[in-house]
Image (cartoon, grey):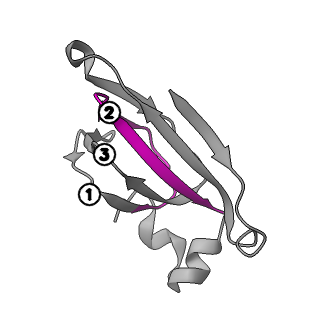
Amino acid sequence: MIFKQIEPSVHLKEYVKNYLLIHFQTTATESLFVKPAPPINEQCLVFYARNLLVGIANTQGKIEKRGKSVLVGQATERVDFQIDTSNYLCIKVVFWPGTLSQILGLPLSEIVNQSI
């Protein structure tokens, strides 16, 4: 299992808070589990390099599938990640608060509780 925070280069420190590398594998008999995630104050870009998230259920019970790369706005409600753990590899770019708004030219209210 790998759970590692990586500092950005000097050139990106103004925009990127850190990178997060997550990798784990399990046996086929326990390959799907649900991980509840509380709301956190971050906007990020996530790359699912191997297995995707199977689905995400929010408080309204809506289930959605994510693509191989996702831009995630700030969460204000809990979500439940359904993860296929047979070979999970995720690389997450965490931006400083407000930076994504500057990059996209959009108010962050446009992407609250959304994955694009």
Q: Could you tell whether 60 is left or right of 76 in the image?
A: left
Q: What kind of secondary structure does the magenta stretch mostly adopt?
A: strand
Q: Residue placed farthest to the bottom in the image?
A: 105
- Cα separation, mark 3 vs mark 2, equals 7 Å
Tag 2: residue type? Asn
Residue 87: assigned label: 2
According to the picture, the residue beneath numbered tag 1 turns out to be 67
According to the picture, the residue beneath numbered tag 3 turns out to be 50
Q: In which quarter of the image is residue 62?
A: top left
Tag 1: residue type? Gly
Camera sees residue 39: no
Residue at image point 58% right, 47% down: 20
Mark 2 crowd level (few <14, some 14–19, many ≥20, 10 Å Cα): some
Residue 8: assigned label: none
Q: Which of marks 3 and 1 is nearer the N terminus?
A: 3
The secondary structure type at the circle numbered 1 is: loop
Specify whether residue 110 is painted magenta. no
Q: In which quarter of the image is residue 3?
A: top right
Q: Position of residue 101 (x, y in %)?
A: 57, 77
Residue at image point 26% right, 57% down: 67
Magenta range is 71-95
Q: Considering only vertical position in the picture, is 103 above or below 53?
A: below
Q: Which of marks 3 and 2 is nearer the N terminus?
A: 3
Q: Considering only vertical position in the picture, is 89 above or below 41?
A: above
Residue contact between numbered discs 3 and 2, judged by CB atoms under 8 Å = yes
The secondary structure type at the circle numbered 3 is: loop
